[in-house]
Image (cartoon, grey):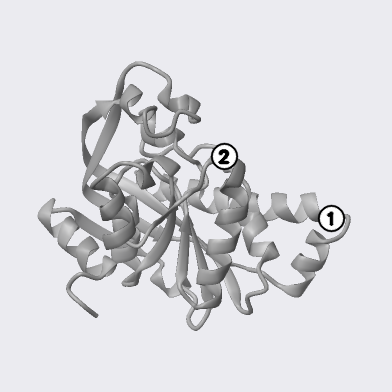
Amino acid sequence: MSLNSPLDISRLFLATFSTRMFRYYEDRIPRDASLLIVSNHRSFMDAMILMTALSSPIRFACHHYMGQVPILREIVTGQLGCFPLETVENRQQSFFAQSQMLLKSKQMVGVFPEGAEPMVQSTPASAVGEFQRGFAHLALRSSVPDLAILPIAIASLEEVNTTAFPLKLLSLFDPSEPLFNQYGWHPLVIYQRVAVLIGRPYWIKNEHQSQYHGKQAKKVISEITQHCHGEIANLLQQGCY
């Protein structure tokens, strides 16, 4: 693996910030499987924390604006291997297409189902917001054998809170995002000590896909979403106290 790999860059980044990371329940990580990683999201460090914790590159879906800002675009796409979401009208289709291609090639795909809200509005370390359900639709639409959704909680034990730049600045790069149409500053959370707690994987089986393409679609989508949200919420309570 080259020195410029996303995993090496992530490890170097955490070392630069002197971030101490503790990993729990690593025996829950499936082996020889395609993995869709789902996690809570409060800090710009989260993708690098998860790659370091799993000792593997992860292809994260990230906010549309990250693919529009010079320098940031080169970092997230070129160095960390993330793929920014498209504009609203093409977002869902492109997300499914890119993610399925990556999963079929046995690359880990990462999703932050809370969206951008906890990144631009300060939230407690032990809280997790409502999940968008796109990741569940992705898993059930994929024709990938041995696919598991792995929920992971990032629990901040000690952090520094500061600010980065005005939120209005981001609206120049993504005017469609209502969260950017407000005054104030983008919060910046820097972990000093952080716990990464691995949840119980949710395996996608043929019966789930049959339900999804039948009359029980809403039920199975809700079941997957609740499982992942519940795992992360419970693990955060363990990790933050």
Q: Residue at x 26, y 38 (%)?
A: 189
Tell me, yes or no, if residue 39 can be seen here: yes
Question: Please, what secondary structure does the residue beneath circle 2 have?
Answer: helix
Of pointers 1 and 2, the one earlier in the residue sequence? 2
Vertical comparison of 168 with 155: above or below: above
Q: Residue at x 36, y 38 (%)?
A: 125
Residue 205: image location, x then y, percent: 71, 73
Q: Residue at x 48, y 30 (%)?
A: 177
Q: Residue at x 35, y 57 (%)?
A: 196
Inspect the image, locate mark 1, and give the three-letter code of the amino acid beneath it.
Gln
In this figure, which residue is indicated by the disc labeled 2?
A: 88
Which numbered tag is attached to residue 166? none
Inspect the image, locate mark 2, and give the three-letter code of the amino acid beneath it.
Val
Residue 154: image location, x then y, percent: 37, 51
Residue 38: image location, x then y, percent: 49, 56
Question: Is 158 on the left-hand or right-hand side of 26?
Answer: left
Between the C-alphas of marks 1 and 2, the distance is: 27 Å
Question: Please, what secondary structure does the residue beneath circle 1 have?
Answer: loop
Which numbered tag is attached to residue 216? 1
